[in-house]
């Protein structure tokens, strides 16, 4: 089943600048090979259910 999600992760306690955290997450998304598009309030990710949610999990694990 193909899905499209809009991912918005906001790590708490990292200060005002989220840039470094967002860059880490973007690296994970790019490495997944999934179709994605960065937006002002999140990142749209498209692909097969298992692949997309594995990517979301990997982003959470990378940031935490």
Image (cartoon, rainbow, N blue to C red):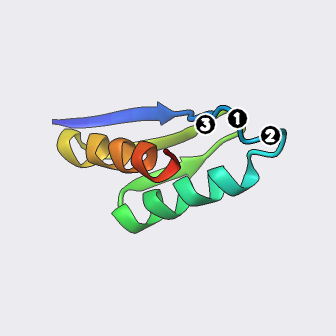
Residue drawn at point x = 36 percent, y = 64 percent: 33
Question: Between disc 3 and disc 2, whose residue precedes?
Answer: 2
Give the secondary structure at mark 2.
loop
Q: Quadrant of residue 20?
A: bottom right
The numbered mark at residue 13 is: 1
Q: Is residue 58 above or below residue 44?
A: below
**Label total for image:** 3
The numbered mark at residue 15 is: 2
Viewer-proximal residue, 58 or 37?
58
Answer with left or right where residue 27 lies relative to residue 58.
right
Name the residue carrying label 3.
42
Label 2 Cα neighbours within 10 Å, binned few <14 / some 14-19 / many ≥20 = few
Residue drawn at point x = 24 percent, y = 49 percent: 51
Tell me, yes or no, whether the two marked residues, 1 and 2, touch with CB atoms within 8 Å.
yes
Viewer-proximal residue, 22 or 34?
22
Label 3 Cα neighbours within 10 Å, binned few <14 / some 14-19 / many ≥20 = some
As drawn, the residue found furthest toward the left would be 1
Residue 47 x %, y %: 29, 47
Q: CA distance from mark 3 to mark 1?
A: 19 Å
Answer with left or right where residue 60 lies relative to residue 54.
right
């Amino acid at each position: 089943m193909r899905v499209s999600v809009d991912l918005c992760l906001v790590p708490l306690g990292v200060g005002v600048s989220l840039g470094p955290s967002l860059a880490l997450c973007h690296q994970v998304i790019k490495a997944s090979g999934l179709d994605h598009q960065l937006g002002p309030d999140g990142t749209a990710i498209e692909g097969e259910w298992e692949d997309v949610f594995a990517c979301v999990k990997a982003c959470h694990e990378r940031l935490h």
